[in-house]
Amino acid sequence: MQTQRFLRCHFDIGRIGNVPTCHIIMNWVIAFRRNASAAEKNTPGRPRTMRSPENVERVRTALQLSPRRSVLQHSQTLGLSDRRARRIINYNLHFHSFKLQIGKN
């Protein structure tokens, strides 16, 4: 409670504003005492290998060299599946695929 009050005063958070719960603050303290750092530990699970920085850079250079080719053609030349190439393009490079359509007037 005292830490929550301090956070409200320090960051000028009103009565209605959200502050971390006591449970979350205690988890931060425990993690800091264990790791001697406030940074989060690596998350458990398999590391991302397909969206690695090397693959992202390969897809970026392929798009820059031939921007008119389709994602499917890029993925086949890079040895990635179509879905993984699309994910790299959307999530890492922040490009969005579209199909140009010409309307009839």
Image (tube, helix red, strand yellow):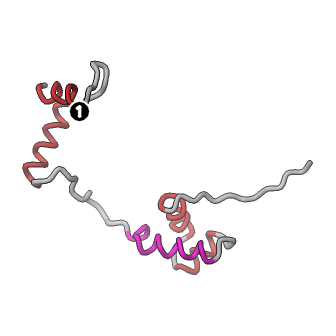
What's the amino acid at mark 1?
Pro
Answer whether residue 50 is magenta in the image.
yes
Could you say which quadrant of the image residue 35 lies in? bottom left
Q: Report the predominant secondary structure element of the magenta stretch.
A: helix
What is the magenta range?
Answer: 49-65
Residue at the left extreme, as displayed: 33
Residue sticking out furthest to the top: 15
Rendering coords of residue 102 (x, y %): 83, 55
Residue at the image point whose x is 65% and y is 71% from the top: 67
Task: Name the spot of residue 61 as percent of width and height, x first.
Answer: 54, 75
Q: Which residue is mark 1?
A: 20
Report the residue at 31% width, 24% height from top: 17
Q: Residues within 10 Å of mark 1 (few under 14, many from 20)?
A: few
Please, is residue 70 above or below residue 25 in the view?
A: below
Q: Secondary structure at mark 1?
A: loop
Q: Is residue 105 left or right of residue 92?
A: right
For residue 23, side relative to residue 43 (left or right): left
The N terminus, quarter of image: top left
Would residue 62 be found to the left or right of residue 104 on screen?
left
Query: Is residue 75 shown in magenta?
Result: no
Q: Position of residue 95 (x, y in %)?
A: 57, 59
Report the residue at 10% width, 54% height from top.
36
Q: Quadrant of residue 83?
A: bottom right
Q: Is residue 46 above or below residue 36?
A: below
Indicate the position of residue 14 as horizontal and vertical percent values: 28, 21
Q: Report the number of discs.
A: 1
